């Protein structure tokens, strides 16, 4: 697939104004959105080669699928149209899954971006990773192409897992587009934020070192930025829905408790790696959310701890997800 990407097509201010005119950005009750299942399946397809979620189709322009592969900063994304004619921009997570062998250069760039995100979330003067701006520019382009084809801007959403989820989180923060992230870290507060995050939700699995790396979840300090309820230096953008078993959160907290002791560093790193492999992979979130992945890959989707409790949210849209998570005591407002 070729990249259709023109950073000159659309500007943030125009996008924000269009969304505000539609009453979309910053509202407490979004219009009907894609379901949790549709978001997770779109994010999962970014780890599979040339995959399209069941029941969806690629978003096209001039006869070509609208995609991006930026080898310089590792931003990779595809765009899908659901059966309800809602557009989902799905950003790829680190390594690219099955795409690693096909594009190791992009995967290497993604690892470098991960380091930049860590510095952005923890440094006193963070520097916004270039990948954030690339992801934002691509979303702006998609909105312009979509509206030209008759899709309302309010029908464009973002999603992604891990690094892809962080990029989706940033794009939503800057534009007000709705969406859902999987295992995204917190996001250093940006003065350019355009909306409040009420139409964007983060799914975080208990015990995952990546999703819990934030200032609004008391799990990974002192490794993560200092905990501040509903805030701090690097909170998630939008509310958080917790998945999995709370006992794993205790294991994570105990693992990082001695992070400042250099003698414990090798064992801590090994234990954190084990927790990533156990709780971070996208098949774990799909299982714990009651989502059936289609297409499904045994290689990508059958790894990690698939024995956690199931919170049946697959068929819910974003407002329904927030409501049910609040009722179940699984919602953290950020």
Image (spheres, rainbow, N blue to C red):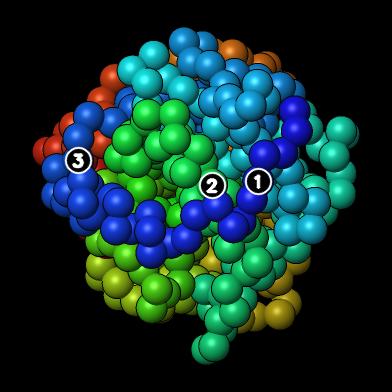
Residue that mark 2 sits on: 141
Residue that mark 1 sits on: 5
- Sequence-first tag of 3 and 1: 1
Mark 2: few, some, or many residues within 10 Å (few <14, many ≥20)?
Answer: many
Tag in front: 3 or 1: 1
Q: Is residue 125 visible?
A: yes
Q: Is residue 243 left or right of residue 255?
A: left
Query: Disc 2 vs disc 1: Cβ atoms closer than 8 Å?
Result: yes
Q: Image quarter for residue 50? A: top right
Q: Image quarter for residue 152? A: top left
Residue occupying the far top of the picture: 55
Q: Is residue 114 left or right of residue 128?
A: right
Residue 296 drawn at (x, y percent): 60, 15
Tag in front: 3 or 2: 2
Q: Residue at x 47, y 44 (%)?
A: 144
Vertically, is 333 above or below 229?
Answer: above
Residue 235 drawn at (x, y percent): 37, 67
Q: Estimate the spatial distance between the alpha carbons at disc 2 and disc 1, rounded to whole Å.
A: 7 Å
Q: Residue at x 80, y 51 (%)?
A: 71
């Amino acid at each position: 697939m070729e990249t259709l990407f023109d950073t000159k097509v659309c500007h943030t201010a125009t996008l924000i104004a269009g969304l505000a005119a539609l009453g979309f950005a910053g509202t407490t009750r979004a219009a009907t959105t894609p379901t949790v299942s549709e978001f997770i399946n779109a994010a999962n397809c970014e780890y599979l080669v040339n995959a399209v979620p069941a029941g969806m189709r690629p978003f096209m322009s001039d006869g070509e699928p609208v995609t991006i592969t930026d080898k310089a900063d590792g931003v990779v994304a595809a765009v899908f149209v659901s059966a309800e004619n809602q557009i989902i921009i799905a950003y790829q997570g680190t390594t690219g899954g099955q795409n690693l062998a096909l594009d190791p250069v992009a995967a290497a760039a993604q690892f470098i971006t991960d380091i930049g995100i860590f510095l952005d979330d923890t440094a006193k003067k963070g520097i916004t990773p270039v990948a954030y701006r690339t992801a934002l520019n691509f979303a702006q382009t998609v909105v312009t192409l979509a509206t030209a084809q008759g899709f309302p801007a309010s029908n464009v959403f973002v999603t992604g897992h891990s690094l892809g989820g962080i990029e989706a989180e940033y794009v939503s923060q800057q534009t007000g587009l709705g969406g859902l992230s999987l295992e995204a870290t917190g996001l250093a507060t940006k003065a350019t934020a355009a909306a409040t995050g009420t139409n964007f939700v983060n799914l975080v699995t208990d015990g995952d070192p990546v999703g819990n790396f934030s200032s609004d979840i008391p799990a990974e300090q002192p490794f993560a930025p200092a905990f501040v309820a509903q805030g701090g230096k690097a909170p998630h953008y939008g509310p958080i829905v917790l998945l999995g078993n709370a006992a794993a959160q205790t294991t994570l907290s105990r693992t990082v408790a001695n992070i400042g002791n250099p003698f414990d560093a090798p064992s801590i790193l090994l234990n954190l790696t084990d927790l990533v492999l156990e709780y971070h992979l996208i098949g774990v979130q799909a299982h714990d959310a009651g989502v059936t992945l289609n297409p499904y890959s045994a290689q990508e989707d059958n790894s990690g701890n698939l024995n956690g409790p199931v919170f049946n949210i697959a068929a819910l849209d974003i407002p329904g997800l927030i409501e049910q998570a609040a009722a179940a005591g699984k919602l953290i407002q950020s």
